[in-house]
Image (spheres, coloured by chain):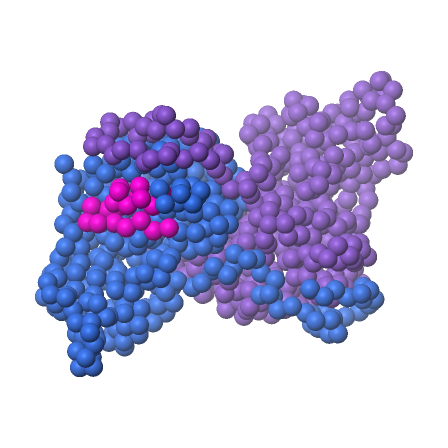
Chain colours: A purple, B blue
Amino acid sequence: MPQPATPPSPFDAVPAGAAAAAAAGAPRPEPTERFAARTAGMTASEIRALFAVASRPEVVSLAGGMPNLAALPLDALAAEVADLVAREGQVALQYGSAQGVPALREQICEVMALEGIRADPDDVVVTVGSQMALDLVTRIYCDPGDVVLAEGPSYVGALGSFAAYQARVVHVAMDEHGLVPDLLRDALGSLAAEGITPKFLYTIPNFHNPAGVTLAVERRAEVLEICASYGVAVVEDNPYGLLGFSGRTYPALRSLSRDVVYLGSFSKTFASGLRVGWALVPPAVRDRLVLAAESASLCPPSFTQMLVSRYLAAHDWRAQIKTYTEVYRDRRDAMLEALATYMPEGCTWNVPDGGFYVWLGVPEGVDTKAMLPRAVTARVAYASGTGFYADGFGSRQLRLSYCYPTPERITEGVRRLAGVLGAELDVMRTFGSSARPALGGGPQAPSPHTP
Amino acid sequence: MPQPATPPSPFDAVPAGAAAAAAAGAPRPEPTERFAARTAGMTASEIRALFAVASRPEVVSLAGGMPNLAALPLDALAAEVADLVAREGQVALQYGSAQGVPALREQICEVMALEGIRADPDDVVVTVGSQMALDLVTRIYCDPGDVVLAEGPSYVGALGSFAAYQARVVHVAMDEHGLVPDLLRDALGSLAAEGITPKFLYTIPNFHNPAGVTLAVERRAEVLEICASYGVAVVEDNPYGLLGFSGRTYPALRSLSRDVVYLGSFSKTFASGLRVGWALVPPAVRDRLVLAAESASLCPPSFTQMLVSRYLAAHDWRAQIKTYTEVYRDRRDAMLEALATYMPEGCTWNVPDGGFYVWLGVPEGVDTKAMLPRAVTARVAYASGTGFYADGFGSRQLRLSYCYPTPERITEGVRRLAGVLGAELDVMRTFGSSARPALGGGPQAPSPHTP
């Protein structure tokens, strides 16, 4: 860019505001022209763009993934946090370790033990939600142009982090039992033929966001083995693992291999507004991750960590999780019943066995992204499928969340959505579209096949 | 890297732990071999490495920058936070906006008004400490190899973020009135001659960390003008601006130009353990910054933001800041008195007019990094100057923090440090080092020259 041939002469007094306009003769770049290349990949997620309209009270939002906190014992928590400030305020309100509060890291290991993980608290790094763990793991693994494997569809926030570090996402499809090992093997083989080794596989094995499926137990070791044979790390994101409706938990991938990078969160099992998540990583990764965390935020808030630690120590958190799952199961049931009642022929959906989401397929010819404004006009919001793919797919899918609205609202929202879909199909029929809905439909994908 | 010629055959059952060892025949890379190039720049700061030893009770730590929270009204805060959970728990414990809680953003504008800033809450982005703001600003501005200007010395956490994004730091020296405009102009001219335009100047105008100096008011517009004329953005980091001992505040660079990216924090004016900071940015930068924040942590904790918001609304936060400054002024006085009493000839130091730090120059021949273990053995810790430069300078300087220890401990710590320095000088004299201390010494750098 152009530079002045000689530096401008100094001046002794400048009125406020004049400095900005001082170099009037020299061409000044717009701030955005000087941004890093990575900003080109930073685009507002469709879901975020939707939040403003979807949050109007008359709209039934089936779009967001906000957990339902109505079941939290607020009075007990209020007493707990007051005691924390009064007795331990000098520590809770002070800087802490970049790796996180030691007592909490021990308790996190107890939480992970529920899914078969044996871990050393020294290998746990507490982060500002598991989103930060994901961002930092990407930071230490990915150079621009590196390839990351992810299920297709995948978590929109993960795709955002991968884009921020200019990584290229290659999707691997799922079936009703989760990630398909043969397709993973095919993807790795094709990439190897191009001389490409992905940096890691990013996977959400339990109650997938957005697909709602769970990786079958008998596939788990195979997925690890395939990745290991190609020298590809595995990043296991497991925010929903303890929210299974059948009352059972699945063995974490990390329980099968200590090489797995495991991401966990209290956002869905306790409270999302505290932003307490974590990564459990191999020792060789830990030191870099702590350094990355330090440059990202110095340290996570001591205050929120100590509150979570007290909550885990003093309250029956397992019972609280059971309460949460009962709430979510009732809402899932309401959604499934409404889908069966209202959805037009040609729609398909899965039956999630836990977590927050139903993944809905719509008849050919319907574009869920294009339909969204019409749905919001009809006072229902969803997340269109395209947001969950890095490659433009997903226009015939959408994600429905049953976590936040009441069962009555869910039923009404699905009814409204069915009306919008029906109208779309009517238009297609009227205007002679070739895209008539296929016959069949209804629920697919039973709960994960397990031995 | 080597790839298996054919994918390994699938297997049906793998005992736990076996997957990791499955590809025994294929060479497997160490996890660290596959890290991103940026990890090469991630090294533990000298200060962090020191924290473990320096935190032993028998060691007087003049190393850390932990604020003193003893003056906080913990009982009142306990009541406030209990009420927050009991009455607003459903919001405080829930996900929030990536940009931050709107009410807090309005209050942040009131805080900034104390330094002459007129801002729109829409241009404020709340972050997890101002460290996260710094990290995200670097993320959106810096490609690998980009140049960033910073004072020499500069904040160690900023150097860490610049390294994490593979930016190259060019230091610009300060004198007792802060950054020297002529040297800034020289640096920009030299870089321009190489065809390089730095992405931004990172500057801490008030009560500098670590140098303790303040940018003279009459230099402020000139610094902005020089940067503007070269098309270089200005990032103003101002965590200490309200902690001036003379009772006056200085006009923020942002008060002189709306193009400045301003970083603020409640870590020093309220409580560091809440990790609430912010960036005030031009509208063209804001949208990218919010997107970057979203991929970094989805949103900052609602809980800590709402607590800060309530604190600002219900408590006399200006009086609290005044209390803090009185505490720090007393400690600064204790340190200056001890330095004058104990330091050997040839040492120089500044007289900070606010903030947390004294920057100590030692006689030629003394290496502050090499001396540090001997100081810790003598039960005093400091931060050696090398940590505050990206280019290896700083071995004849060290940073002393007076923020956390009591005045008595400060006096004792300085006495111990003087003993260590004296012993170093004795050894140099005994072994005939040419590096005899220069004559003179004592306090330098009066409080910033202001009209």
Residue A222, horizontal then vertical, whole percent = 77, 64
Which residue of the protein is positioned furthest toward the right in this rendering? A439
Query: Relative to B258, does residue B400 appear above or below in the rendering?
Result: below
* Residue at image coords 38%, 57%: B390
Residue A320 visible in the current orientation: no
Horizontal side, residue A368 vs residue B77: left or right: right
Query: Relative to B182, does residue B273 appear above or below in the rendering?
Result: below
Determine which quarter of the picture holds residue B223: top left
Horizontal side, residue B262 vs residue B336: left or right: right
Foreground residue among B288 and A266: B288
Residue B336 visible in the current orientation: yes
Foreground residue among B438 and A442: B438
Foreground residue among B166 and A358: B166
Residue B429, horizontal then vertical, whole percent = 17, 78
Is A99 within the magenta? no
- How many marks do you count on the picture? 0
Query: Relative to B22, does residue B184 appear above or below in the rendering?
Result: above
Residue B382, horizontal then vertical, whole percent = 27, 65
Foreground residue among A229 and A27: A27
* Residue at image coords 30%, 57%: B65
Which residue of the protein is positioned furthest toward the bottom in this rendering? B430
* Residue at image coords 31%, 53%: B152
Residue B146, horizontal then vertical, whole percent = 46, 47
* Residue at image coords 72%, 69%: B19
Determine which quarter of the picture holds residue A438: top right
Residue bounds of the magenta highlight: B170-188
